[in-house]
Image (cartoon, helix red, strand yellow):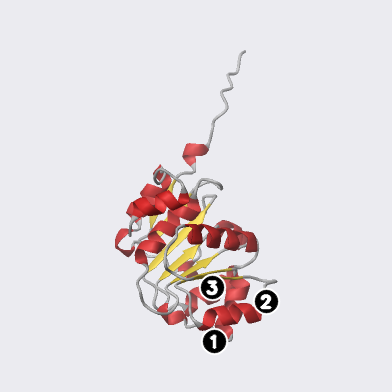
Amino acid sequence: MELESIYKKLQIPEMNQMQKSTYKATENQQDVVLLSPTGSGKTLAFLFPVLRNLKKTSGIQTLILVPARELALQIEQVFKAMGTNFKVSVCYGGHDKKIEVNNLIEAPAVLIGTPGRVVYHLRNNNFDPKTIQTLVLDEFDKALELGFHDDMEFICNSLKGLSQRILTSATAMDEIPKFTGLRDEKVIDFLKLNEAKPDIQLKK
């Protein structure tokens, strides 16, 4: 993977510190939990490792689950901007199911979707979950908040061939549900860095 040429296409000088830390931590199929504020560049933080994992084989290799359509489209846009030769598809509620089914006939390397719609395609056997090796649960905290627990559990239980899980969240979570299947995960916490503490002195 030629990082320099991707930086050029994305018009960035290099990865930021959070992205570098994630890239390093995700080597050797290590499971990772990335805690970082919204707008800090989490999308590229997981897309670089995703791209490193992709091979020239058929079938969906990476599934990226997101809580909202806008986020799915945004990630698709960034992935396309990286200028790889890999196919990417999106599926989300409100989108024409026929178009999605047609896009899945020749399976993309990367599928980005909202939990409810991914469950629909799984139940209708529109793609083979066995080929998926990398799972990204993006904005996982928000997905749980929006009530996608059961759908995500169903999806995670359907993915038998996973070798890596990357979970991102903009808030620290007391407990991560067992269904994620995280193993010896490495936690990368960039939340503290963005907490600007007000400089207030109490004068008596």
Which label sits in the foreground, 2 or 3? 2
Which residue occupies the foreground of this view, 3 or 132? 3
Report the residue marked by disc 2: 96
- In the image, what residue type sits under mark 3? Glu
Count of marks placed on residues: 3
Query: Any mark on residue 153, and which?
Result: 3
Looking at the rendered structure, the secondary structure element under dot 2 is loop
Which label sits in the foreground, 3 or 1? 1
Which residue occupies the foreground of this view, 13 or 204? 13
Tell me the quadrant of the picture where the N terminus can be found: bottom left
Tell me the quadrant of the picture where the C terminus can be found: top right
Report the residue marked by disc 1: 125
- Inter-mark Cα distance, 2 to 3: 24 Å
Tell me which corner region of the image, top left, top right, bottom left or bottom right, holds residue 31.
bottom left
Residue 167 vertical position relative to residue 90 in the rendered view, above or below: above
Looking at the rendered structure, the secondary structure element under dot 1 is loop
Q: Position of residue 144 (x, y in %)?
A: 60, 62
Could you classify mark 3 by the number of other residues whose Cα lies within 10 Å: few (under 14), some (14-19), or many (20 or more)?
Answer: some
Could you classify mark 2 by the number of other residues whose Cα lies within 10 Å: few (under 14), some (14-19), or many (20 or more)?
Answer: few
- Inter-mark Cα distance, 3 to 1: 17 Å
